[in-house]
Image (spheres, coloured by chain):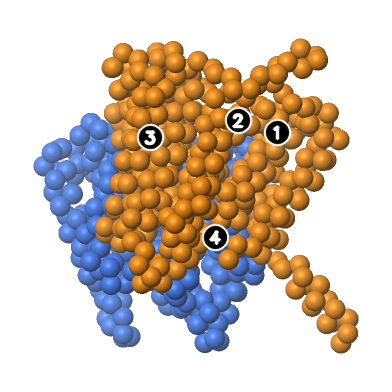
Chain colours: A orange, B blue
Amino acid sequence: MHNHTVELRLAVVLALICAGLSIAAPQFATLPNLTSLLNNSAVNLIWAVGLLVVLVAGGIDISFAVASSVVQYIAAKLLISMGGGNWVLGFLFCGSIGILLGLLNAWLIHGFRIISIVVTIATFNAFFGLLMFFTGGRNIYNLPDWWTARIFIFEHEGADGIWSELTLPVGIMIGCVVATWILLRRTNIGRQLFAFGDNPEGARRAGVNIAVMQGIAFGWMGLMAGIAGLCQVNIVKEVVPNALYGRELDVLAAVVLGGARLGGGKGTILGCILGVMFVAVTQNGLNLLGVSPFAFQMIIGAAILIAISTSNIDLSRILRLGQREARA
Amino acid sequence: MMARTSTAVPKEPRKALIGKENLGLLAMLAVLVVAFSLTSDRFLTGANLGSMGFQMPLLGLLTLAMLAPIVSGGLNLAIVYTANISGLTLAWTLMQFGGPEAGIPAFILGCALALIVGAIAGATMGAVIAYIGAHPILVSLAMMIFLRGLGEFLTRGGDISGFPGYMNVLGHGSLAGIPVPLILFAVTALAWHILLRRTPHGFSVYMTGSNMRAAEYAGLNARRTLVLIYTLSGILCAIAGILMAARFNSVRVGHGEAMLLITVLACFLGGIDPFGGHGRVAPVILSLVILQVLSSGLNLIGANQHLATAVWGLFLIAVMVMRSDRLKRTFRFSRKDT
């Protein structure tokens, strides 16, 4: 069921890019650069593993980045009105609001049999419109200190005096990745999610509870969106209602690039990480090589286009065809 | 309206033009118009109707560009940026001929180049989808990211403005009291309707959308159909891009970005089957009118554009929920089952 060709190819390409960058840009393979790469990818990776669960279950979610913004705003208002709060309350609030938004999607999808892309495009507009309407687009700066303080989980001073450090969101990201891996690969629920995504009717007849599956998939995505929202505030130290708008499609492209199938039943955590890192490393490498930042998106878009254009081509089949023609 | 009644004569086994779908939407539209007329006395004025007529065509053209790929069983997420890049092509051509001083021939050349650029973007997507079998969402997403990047690279994130005065006619002019953009939209929509419902290619699009393999076994060239429909979608985006340049008197990458998901919303509101194979132009146009009425009406009673966005989303959910009984019967979980 799990054939790892996509992951293998992506890993090889990523390794080649990394090797090339290490030679072309001396700063690339340094600890400070690699740690900042991880710091900058934390939020995308948290979203990515959440989205993977939804894709595995045969759905799609467009609303998660906007959901993160909603979570940030509500949680910030609640925490400030309570006089501060702490990390535990932060997780509790962000996680539960996120889950609620995810379950709302799941309820609309399952309860009314509307396909997930329609529901999440609708909730995307509803969430974003309501958020902008009620907040008037105003930012929140006076956040509790615990939320905006940088917490280092790894620090290292290099010989040249440059610090390499990993911040708390990276730790949270690793936790989310491991938790999602356990959910998908080590639990009965994970197996049911794959079965449901691969063949919903078959899974239903085999006794899988479809409503629960939709709830778990979108609830998990919501939880991840909530946690990503919490982390994003820690990184940028402010709540901006429209800051995350538009990032959902980039994350979706990265996750599908990593081998998750639109249509369900296929996808791995490794592929997910490779897909996000492929985009992050390319962007970082172009930056180090002194390429104009305006060209980043163009090159990444072209890379994804080339990747998907070649990923479905079966190299062994082409070789065999070549042999047959040579013989003929 | 006169022409419509004549086309409604059922010569073939198909739904009449004012079908069940249209009736529901017309009823909704009537309710909205009455409600807004009662709450704001400025709603049913010539000025408001005129401004609606100027605002709707842009979203309308992009929605038509989204509609055909969905009917073919896909999606085109690159529409807004295809329009942007085509608009840039036109702007760049005009700049080569002196910007505001550029003559009509330069404008025609620019439009031709814009249409070619749109067609190339669409054809590339169509080819990858048809011949490599990659998922349309992913292909058009990658194309969207690429075109957005290309546009930002070429313009350095800035805008190009200062176009010849006659372009104003296209964006803001009226012909016999009817806004020129609305005429452009009406002509395109009619052409799109004829293309989809009255030509062999349109038939092939519906067949490919409902079951690509069956279409191929039936002797249709499904792959060529897909390339063609995405190419036409790209050309329509280019027309939208030209109109955008004329209306805003500037071209900027990201103009109209918020319209992307609204076009999908309008398509589904208009009863297009998300899995492809079913859907008509007329109900989608009705949906567009409804969305425009909602937006203008809310604006008149003092709410802002963001509330309109939220209401559009909630409205789609409400319509889908109301249709869910019908959906339950035809619901298929994934395309693989087909």
Do dots 2 and 1 share one subunit? yes
Q: Residue at x 26, y 49 (%)?
A: B315
State how far apart marks 4 and 2 are (Cα). 27 Å
- Can you identify the residue that label 3 sits on? A95
Of circles 1 and 4, the one toward us is: 4
Q: Position of residue A226 (x, y in %)?
A: 41, 35
- Can you identify the residue that label 2 sits on? A40
Q: Nearer the viewer, residue A166 or B155?
A: A166
State how far apart marks 3 and 2 are (Cα). 21 Å
Residue A284 is labelled as 1
State how far apart marks 4 and 3 are (Cα). 26 Å
Please report whichever mark, 1 or 4, sits nearer to the chain's N-terminal start: 4
Number of residue marks: 4
Q: Can you say which quadrant of the picture contains the N terminus of chain A?
A: bottom right
Could you classify mark 1 by the number of other residues whose Cα lies within 10 Å: few (under 14), some (14-19), or many (20 or more)? Answer: many
For the residues labelled 1 and 4, say whether their Cβ atoms are less than 8 Å apart.
no
Residue B210 is labelled as none
